[in-house]
Image (spheres, rainbow, N blue to C red):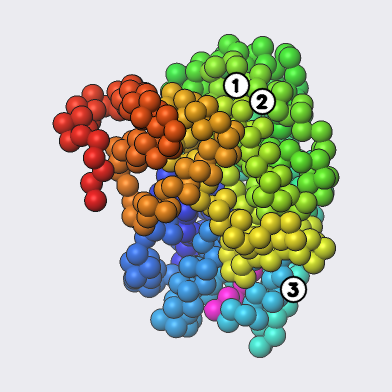
Amino acid sequence: MKILLTTLNSKYVHSNLALKYLYTVVAGENSHIEVREFTINNDPGYIFSELVRANYDMVCFSCYIWNIEQIKVLARDLKEARPEMKILAGGPEVSFDGPEFMKENSWADYIICGEGEYPFYRLCQVLESPDRRFDTVPGLIYRQDGKIYVNALLEPMDFNLIPFPYSILDCEDDRVVYYESSRGCPFRCSYCLSSTETSVRFLDMDRVKSELGYFLYKKPMQVKFIDRTFNCRPDRAYEIFKYLIDNDNGVTNFHFEICADLLDDRTLRLLSGARKGLFQMEIGIQSTNPPTLAAIGRKENVYPVLYNTERLMKLGNIHTHVDLIAGLPYESYEIFARSFDKVYDLRADMLQLGFLKVLRGTPMSSQIEAHGIKYRSHAPYEVISTDYISAEELVHLKMIENMVDIYYNRGGFEETMEFLIKSVNLGAFGFYEKLADFYYEKGYQHRDRKKEDQYRILLEFAASLGGEASDIKDKTRELLEADMKRSTNPEIFKRFLRKGWELPR
């Protein structure tokens, strides 16, 4: 039986760890199984043609909020082209309300709910057996004789029984390498699918070090841990950090999602000795409003998080991302602005402004009436409005998000932005709000802009401020030239000066 494991990643540099696990558990018994990954940016006709002409007996899709709508269209077309082809779906987007998904999508022959390694292994055995006892596959939803059957879920396995996914498959040089040393999360954030898990399972430390040793030998550019809260056991995190520092290959960067308030003095001292670029930390702050934090199941006192994030930043050698989520319960536009200012003051390397997504199976999905949450009916199920913030205000935050991404996250405007924020004297949020209004009133959002055009737009914005605008404009131009000279190729800088400051129309 010829089987394909596939998905549509959000970008080419991303890869799918779930497919690698599934391949590893069955590859020894099935030589006719392949892994092939596409992206949501590939031409749909190209993907369709590739899958039809390969003549697979079964195609298995890994489904997430960023690809489910495109997978639905692709799978329906595949079923029309080859009705005998079996189609399996797995992943977070089909693991909840699976029977309803089967009813709505007639192309789906099988769904695997929850953790998939053993159920997939068992399904492959059943498909090759003469009696085809699908009722023996845990976590499987399947069609038979016009009816939909739902099997009981498998209890979470000992994580150490699941093989290392890179034991057979190569570690790609041109993609982010994903890795997990634990499954589950001890916290219960109401918007997160991890809140549905009841335990955290850890790989043995000797195995973790052995597998990290493989990555250090192979030297990929980045290994991204997908542990939901990597440092939920601070001593364990310390041991892994120390192993990576002691065995640093000078090339690979390791990314972790951490809880900042769990960082202790000992760990911070250890991290201070790491090579700059060795570690990247992502910290989900989400809000600084105590009623909001309580409503989403997080600690109400955010100050230990802010304090330790600031201490981490001061080390100067750890690339740090911080996250905020707009549209959460009890957070109005004004309250979100206060959260933004507090988090912006940390001066993290990246500030990711996200928007609430109401995911099936999460506690948040059962609280929509209590908070008047309206959200889009299709993936990614993003918030439209709540009792606390209007649709217009959320759209305004989208505009601000765009400005933060262009002028803060992408870098190259550091000194200029510091000067302008102080000159406008409205705080960071007020500044980005004013900049966003200017940018969108001018219509600059309607097409992609080169980086050098964004310098010209920022100078034009400085000139629009009024009052002592001429002084602000002159100083802004001076700082922009210094920022650009420092952050770009010298030839690009020279070309920019030759073309001048007038924005091409």
Name, please, the residue furthest toward the left: 498
Secondary structure at numbered mark 2: helix
Tell me residue 340's x, y (percent). 63, 38
Q: Earlier in the sequence, mark 1 or mark 3?
A: 3
Magenta region includes residue 305: no
Judged left or right of residue 57, residue 267 is right
Which residue is nearer to you in this view: 442 or 144? 442
Mark 3 to mark 2 CA distance (whole Å)? 45 Å
Label 2 crowding class (10 Å Cα cut-off): few <14, some 14-19, many 20+? many
Secondary structure at numbered mark 1: helix
In this rendering, the count of numbered labels is 3
Q: Residue at x 56, y 22 (%)?
A: 318
Residue type indicated by callout 3: Val
- Disc 3: which residue: 150
Residue type indicated by callout 2: Thr
Tell me residue 83's x, y (percent). 47, 83
Q: Do the residues labelled 3 and 2 touch (CB within 8 Å)?
A: no
Q: What stretch is highlighted in magenta?
A: 107-111
Residue type indicated by callout 1: Met
**For residue 367, which quarter of the picture?**
bottom right
Secondary structure at numbered mark 3: strand
Residue 363's place in the image compared with 208, above or below, is below
Q: Residue at x 35, y 64 (%)?
A: 43
Residue 134's place in the image compared with 234, above or below, is below
Magenta region includes residue 110: yes
- Disc 1: which residue: 313
- Disc 2: which residue: 309
Mark 1 to mark 3 CA distance (whole Å)? 49 Å
Q: Do the residues labelled 2 and 1 touch (CB within 8 Å)?
A: yes
Judged left or right of residue 6, residue 206 is right
Q: Can residue 157 be seen in this view?
A: no
Q: Residue at x 70, y 75 (%)?
A: 99
